[in-house]
Amino acid sequence: MQFFRSVNSVAPLALFCSRLFLKLFSFLFIVRVHLSSLLYRIFHLVILDTAYYLASLLAMNSTSSLFSSPAETYWGQFDEITKYNVHLNVWERLWAAWYAYLQNDVLATGIMSFVMHEIIYFGRSIPWAIIDRISYFNKYKIQNQKIPTAQEQWSCAKLVLLSHFTVELPQIWLFHPMAQYVGLATGVPFPSLLTMLYQIAVFFVLEDTWHYWSHRALHWGPLYKNIHKIHHQYSAPFGLAAEYASPIEVMILGLGTVGAPLLWCAITGELHILTMYIWIVCRLFQAIDAHSGYEFPWSLHHFLPFWAGAEHHDVHHEKFIGNYSSSFRWWDYILDTESGPEAAKKRRERRLAKEGKKIQ
Ligand SMILES: [Zn+2]
Ligand SMILES: [Zn+2]
């Protein structure tokens, strides 16, 4: 009797486990199929298609059609689009050929977004790591007694890479369905330069506001201890450390970067994904440069006094308090959360003036 009772309780569990195993197995199989087809397509595009295209350029004067790009290749699509869309510029044709070649918008946007993010992130932060090794630049380093070692930078880069592949990649993959839902345009022709410029300016203001309030909230005891502390591991930041943070923080602060344009698109119904890409490139430059730890006589905030830059964020990492915004200085100025000795001096002077008035 006892035996049957225990079989009865084990059976549903075994069934559940076998179902879970089957689901996991089929999921892994789908992922594997997707990955192999993705790798094949990338290989096809980078190696075979480009070889076809170069060969066809070489054979342009020959009468042989042996080297012409077949229609199903990337460059074949490019040729087809060029033939029927003479009004499009070369960038628009390259763009349209990418979407036509992959025939899967989620994949096309996903690959482009991820590759762009990696190229810009490492392409912008590695030069800062090289500058750290050149003693000439030491005089421009804000906390110049705390130059990060190559070992420190390497372990930071490894963690950032791990986070990119495990946390950011799935989010980037989800981006296209969200973009489609709010009506983000992916086609050609591209919007005008003026439209892109004013929209990017709006995103800078919106993101900075989101960043100020959410970053300030992340400095509240329990949130700091459980989430934001990881980002503050380096009291003297460096470029590669810009995205060195907890996955939850990446999601919270990333919402300002991705959410602001999506909100804009949902309200106005007017946004092209290219504008979004240029905005993300600008935002990555801003975040990496703010963490660079270098202050030059030609730094942007000398010409645009409301621009935050490295000088603003470096103090935040050093003092752990104040200077919460990302791109601009106005929120910290208005709400009196500026950090550093100058801000402390001003605050002291204001307090003394107030006390003096009271005594009079
Ligand atoms: Zn912080
Ligand atoms: Zn930081």
Image (spheres, helix red, strand yellow):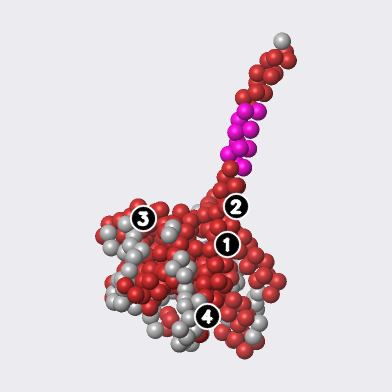
**Mark 3, secondary structure of its residue:** helix
- Which of the labelled discs sits on residue 120, or is there none? none
Which residue is at a point 33% across and 62% down the rendered structure image?
A: 185
User: Looking at the image, which is closer to me, 57 or 149?
Assistant: 57
Q: Is residue 190 visible?
A: yes
Residue position marked by numbered label 3 in the rendering: 180
Residue position marked by numbered label 4 in the rendering: 55
Q: Quadrant of the C terminus?
A: bottom left
Among the 4 quarters of the image, the one containing residue 140: bottom right
Mark 1: amino acid: Leu
> Could you tell which of marks 2 and 3 lies nearer the N-terminus?
2
Which residue is at a point 55% across and 54% down the rendered structure image?
A: 34
Residue projecting furthest to the right: 3
> Could you tell which of marks 3 and 4 lies nearer the N-terminus?
4
**Magenta residue span:** 14-25
> Could you tell which of marks 1 and 2 lies nearer the N-terminus?
2
**Side (left or right) of 318 relative to 327:** right
Residue position marked by numbered label 2 in the rendering: 32
Residue position marked by numbered label 1 in the rendering: 39
What separation in Å lies between label 2 and label 3 (alpha carbons)? Answer: 26 Å
What separation in Å lies between label 1 and label 4 (alpha carbons)? Answer: 23 Å
What separation in Å lies between label 3 and label 4 (alpha carbons)? Answer: 38 Å
Among the 4 quarters of the image, the one containing residue 320: bottom right
